[in-house]
């Protein structure tokens, strides 16, 4: 597993995750806590969430993002 950080300018730095990371506890649906006004997908959206699932290889994770838009209904990203 690797960990990424995001910041303005340049590329993110990747570091190895610690052995204490429990990927199973990370799986499932996560809901938005903080709104980023610069992401077009989130404009006029509510109930923004992401579903995290472990891929068949057992090493990588898939993420499916969606939210409810007042004008367009449920919207996938």
Image (spheres, rainbow, N blue to C red):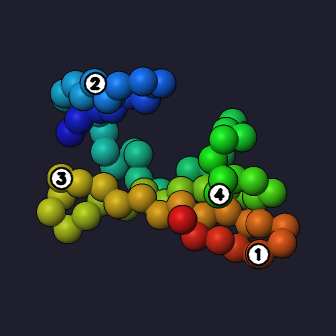
Of the two numbered discs 2 and 1 on the same chain, state the one appearing first in sequence: 2
Of the two numbered discs 4 and 1 on the same chain, state the one appearing first in sequence: 4
Of the two numbered discs 4 and 2 on the same chain, state the one appearing first in sequence: 2
Which element carries disc 2, helix, strand or loop? loop
The part of the image, by quadrant, that contains residue 14 is top left
Q: Position of residue 32 (x, y in %)?
A: 65, 46
Question: Tag on residue 13?
Answer: 2
The part of the image, by quadrant, that contains residue 34 is top right
Q: Position of residue 17 (x, y in %)?
A: 23, 29
Of the two numbered discs 3 and 1 on the same chain, state the one appearing first in sequence: 3
Relative height, residue 49 to residue 18 (above, below): below
> Residue at 43% of width from left, 29% of height from top?
6
Cα–Cα span, label 2 and label 3: 20 Å
Cα–Cα span, label 4 and label 1: 12 Å
Question: Tag on residue 59?
Answer: 3
Give the residue number, with chain letter if any, for mark 4: 41
């Amino acid at each position: 597993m690797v960990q990424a950080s995001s910041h303005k300018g340049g590329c993110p730095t990747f570091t190895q995750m610690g052995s204490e990371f429990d990927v199973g506890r990370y799986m499932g649906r996560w809901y938005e806590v903080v709104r980023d006004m610069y992401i077009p997908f989130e404009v006029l959206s509510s109930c923004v969430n992401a579903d995290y699932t472990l891929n068949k290889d057992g090493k990588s994770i898939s993420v499916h993002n969606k939210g409810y838009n007042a004008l367009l209904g449920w919207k996938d990203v």
